[in-house]
Amino acid sequence: MFKNIYFIFQKELKIFFHTFMAPIVLGGTAFLNALFVLISNFNERATHEEATIVTFISFMSTIIIAMAILSMNSLVEEKNRGTMELLYTSPITDLEIVLGKFLFGSFVCLLIAFGINAFFPILLYAYWKAPLYIVISGSIGVFFLGIFTYSVGMFGSSLGKNQVSSILISVIIVMTLWVLGFFSHLFEAKTRAILFHLHVFSHFISFSRGTIPLSAVVFFVSGIITFLYLTIKSLESRRWLG
């Protein structure tokens, strides 16, 4: 099992660094993050803590964009190249395909959150004198949000017929979670609590403020498992339908 997962991981990694996706995802994220850091640094009235929180909230948008773009090709491209049928006829299960591709997405997200983005937290802490606890928790939050977005994108890619429909499905799911949480105050207490828990951005903001709440970790982990499960079921249905 682990051999097949590692094979999928290596294949995805090789394709990523030999195509235009690497400079778009990694380079684009670094550029946007640098821009956000500069913009936040220009606000002289903000304290170091406030500026750091605003900076990590800005990083939220870049990681969502990066992982949505990365995930839109995860399964759609396999179908377009005709390699999905090859995977179906090989001794590789749907679980191994999904886990291998998710491992790849997690690795790229790790590069962004603690590799490419490492420059910015170091800059924030050493030069900007930002609180270290916010720098650490914010980077962890970026990673969790990134792999959550990638799992949603994988599900969208398993349903979509092309890259556009794939990323559209992913955006609709993420925005639905945001809208449900944003308007949760319009409902009764029990419903409000449930809908607010689905508010993905409120969980990330907790990380950006210097805390690592258990409820946020549970939300992201359970969300990732849910969408990976749905992706596996989507592949199984396609396998049976041919």
Image (spheres, grey):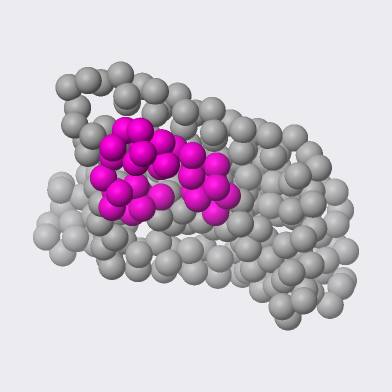
Could you say which quadrant of the image residue 237 lies in? bottom right
Q: Is residue 199 visible?
A: no
Near-viewer residue (144 or 222):
144
In the image, taking residue 88 as reference, residue 39 lies left or right, namely left
In the image, taking residue 136 as reference, residue 171 lies left or right, namely right
The quadrant of the picture occupied by the C terminus is: bottom right
Q: Residue at x 46, y 32 (%)?
A: 33
Near-viewer residue (112 or 153):
112
Magenta-colored stretch includes residue 125: yes
- What is the x, y in percent for residue 195? 26, 56
In the image, taking residue 236 as reference, residue 220 lies left or right, namely left
Q: Is residue 76 above or below residue 49?
A: below
Could you say which quadrant of the image residue 20 lies in? top right
Main secondary structure found in the magenta portion: helix
Q: Is residue 36 visible?
A: yes
The quadrant of the picture occupied by the N terminus is: bottom right
Q: Provide the residue span drawn in magenta.
A: 110-139
- What is the x, y in percent for residue 99? 64, 68
- What is the x, y in percent for residue 2? 71, 78
